Amino acid sequence: MQINEYFTFKNIAFALMLCIFIYFLSKITDIALMIFASFVLASTLLPLVNKLSKKMPRAAASGLIMVALILGIFLVFIPLTVFTLEQFALLIKNAPYYIGLLHKVASFKIFGYSLAGVLEPIHLADVLNSVSSTVLEKTISATAAIASSAAGMIAIAIMTFYICVDYDVLKKGFLKLFPQNLKDKARDIIDSVTQKVGGYVFAQLVSMLFVGVFLGLGLLLMGHKHALMLGFIAFAFD
């Protein structure tokens, strides 16, 4: 097969359009990431939207789910994040006291050896005091950053709403980009990707929720004063 067969006007035009698309995509990275996040979120919510749309208009079902999601974020997630930052700063501030207790416990000798020589409470206390002051200062700026990200959350929520409402229309429009002999295969791939992405995100959220709730409840039953903070941190990092 000769190389000249690839240098057709169609292939050259496609390569140029691809380069232009990649160039403009690099200039709108934030918007592209928001669209991607909206697709992932819509893939997670589509099964619920499809069920509710059997009992009410699809727009109403999508709107109801998005309102519940936004209220959950603003009434639960953001306050918990701010509370966790404040508790974390308090924990670091009191860390020298905890290290002193740990040092006393580590001073207990077993077969003539102890862990006290490894721990240096004085140096650790100095370091943690400086860290605690920094964390306390950054807590305010972190709270402001969370508030400023509210606009991005609302934009993602709006895009997710329209994807959920007009998912079939968007899919048909996207399939028009493919030749007739590839439409069925492209449709199967789109449906498979949407289903698997949504299922993965939903399963991950359930796993995160169980880890955070059970860890928080367990520490709360043990009387730990930072049970809520540690449970939320486990939820977020899981």
Image: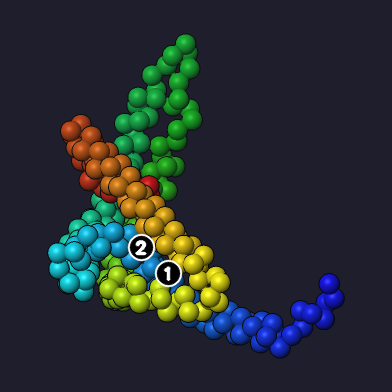
Residue at 31% x, 31% y is 101
Against 79, residue 237 (above or below) is above
Secondary structure beneath label 1 = helix
Figure check: 137 above or below 222: below
Report the front residue among 70 and 140.
70
Residue to which mark 1 is pinned: 36
- Between 107 and 208, the residue placed more toward the observer is 208
Q: Which residue is mark 2?
A: 43
Residue projecting furthest to the top: 111
Whole-percent x, y for residue 20 in the image: 60, 85
Q: Tag 1: residue type?
A: Phe
The spot of residue 19 in percent (x, y) is 63, 82
Furthest residue in direction left, as rendered = 55
Element assignment for label 2 = helix
Q: In terms of image quadrants, where is residue 59?
A: bottom left
On screen, residue 192 above or below 120: below
Residue 215 located left or right of residue 25: left
Instruction: Judge whether residue 116 can be spotted in this image.
Output: yes
Question: Percent from the top left, x then y, of residue 153?
Answer: 30, 71
Residue furthest to the right in view is 2
Query: Front-most of 79 and 152?
Result: 152
- Which numbered disc, 2 or 1, marks the residue that appears first in the sequence? 1
Residue at image coords 44%, 42%: 123
Query: Taking 218 as reference, is 171 left or right?
Result: right
User: In screen coordinates, is 181 left or right of 85?
Assistant: right
Report if residue 208 is visible in the image.
no
